[in-house]
Image (cartoon, helix red, strand yellow):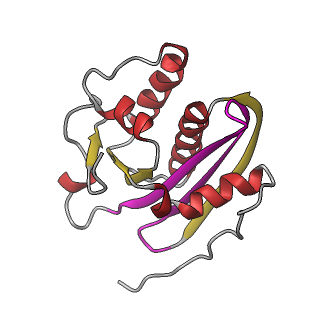
Amino acid sequence: MPETAALPVSPASSTSAGSPESATPSTPCWTVHIDGSALPNPGRMALGAVLVSPAGVCHTVSQDTHRTGCNNEAEVLALLAALEVLHTQQAQHAHVYSDSSILVEQLTLAKPKPVVRLTPLYDLARAAVRQFSGVTLHWVPRHRNQQADALARAALQLPGAVPAPTAIKRKP
């Protein structure tokens, strides 16, 4: 999948527009990077997320799920955790970046190839996305998702974990 792909997930369906791009320039939009880890795969799962508000305030999630599963399951759990933070912050629009092409395809293609074991989890993620006015999912290569990966690794106490990013206040 190309690095520049921006795939909208609408409140109404997983394939139509309704994304932050269709919002007015004054609409506040969050930037979110998510990652899930399973060690080994399948194994212990953890998740990480970096959420930056329109004002530049950084929120992070680094969580051991205390469950076992595969990396694809961990990726969906990372998305759900990030959406929960967005909900508590009363966000309505977000660009979500993930290095999981499977997650992006499952939530954006009209008829994705089914992953039977994870279908209920993907359905839960679709329902969670529909609670927002506009969410776009973007695939990014792993090297562009290092902070979320480091937070997931930190939750598993793995090498390569780095301190959480600091809050950044952007000037309007």
Query: Which picture quadrant has residue 14?
Result: top left
Q: In this view, does 59 lie to the left or right of 130?
A: right
Q: Is residue 42 left or right of residue 146?
A: right
Which residue is most to the bottom? Answer: 171
Give percent across and percent down for residue 35: 56, 49
Q: Give the range drawn in magenta.
A: 28-56
Relative depth, front residue between 62 and 150: 150
Give percent across and percent down for residue 36: 60, 44
Give percent across and percent down for residue 49: 58, 54
**Residue at position x 67%, y 58% from top?**
151
Q: In which quarter of the image is the C terminus?
A: bottom left
Which residue is most to the top? Answer: 116
Give percent across and percent down for residue 34: 53, 51
**Residue at position x 19%, y 40% from top?**
17
**Residue at position x 42%, y 34% from top?**
102
Please tell me whether residue 146 belongs to the stretch shown in magenta. Answer: no
Q: Reply above or below: 161 against 10.
A: below
**Residue at position x 71%, y 54% from top?**
153
